[in-house]
Image: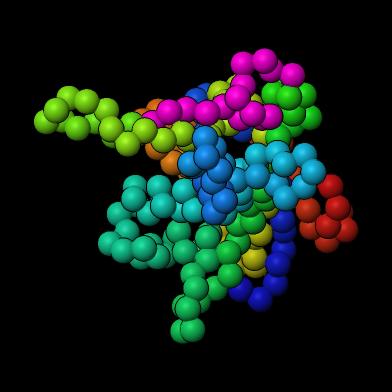
Amino acid sequence: MKQLVKKIKYQTSITLITGLHIGGSSDNVEIGGIDNPVIKLATKGNEPYIPGSSLKGKMRCLLEQTLGASEIGGNKDVNNLFGNAGNDENSQPSKLIVRDALLTEESKTFLLECDNLDMPYTENKWENVIDRTKGVAEHPRQSERVPAGAVFNAEFILNVWDDDKEEELVALFEKGIRLLENDYLGGSGSRGYGQIKFGEFKRTELSEDNNWQA
């Protein structure tokens, strides 16, 4: 791995099929407030977003599961795409860059104007623990979710080096996308949260031939 020969940019959308919860800070919960808030941008708009680290981490986890890694970081093909931390000769940087996914302008407007939401952009959902012996719900708390139907802009950058087999990198990336669509993103996926759908992918190749510009 001596020379970067190509960057493949993938631009797409992420539509929430079910409500999404990716946790934020709950250090200052007021009485009657949300116990389990979602992560939001530290801007005036305070919009929820999908961290690139959440997308990347879940894709990596699912690929390791399906490829049979005996431990975290135990598959060389996954390590080649996602990188491998460490101080030995096997350490390498990630070849996949995953941007934070931000709400589309259309979704921002729709969510702000929606009368059925509990807060700007988000909804509250009560969660309970069921005592199976007594058959009653206990310890209720409120979880914040970005509602189904919200759409985010997503971008992935795949760096191809001189010793890479491009088709293998692309195939592994595409497999990770398919696995994520058939699993869930964020928390409480076994309770129905976090089902997503990617839109059509726009692929752009950047190299010396086009001066690394789209």
Residue drawn at (49%, 53%) of the image: 57
Task: Classify residue 135 by image quadrant.
Answer: top left
Residue drawn at (77%, 47%) of the image: 43
Question: Whole-percent x and y of residue 103?
Answer: 71, 35
Q: Is-magenta flag for residue 57?
A: no
Question: Whole-percent x and y of residue 22?
Answer: 52, 43
Question: Whole-percent x and y of residue 87?
Answer: 49, 84
Q: Is-magenta flag for residue 123?
A: yes
Tell me: residue 149, above or below residue 98: above
The span picked out in magenta is 113-127
Tell me: residue 114, above or below residue 95: above
Q: Nearer the viewer, residue 177 or 27?
A: 27
* Residue 43 shown left or right of residue 118 in the figure: right
The total of numbered circles placed on residues is 0
Question: Whole-percent x and y of residue 197?
Answer: 55, 29
Q: Nearer the viewer, residue 51 or 214?
A: 51
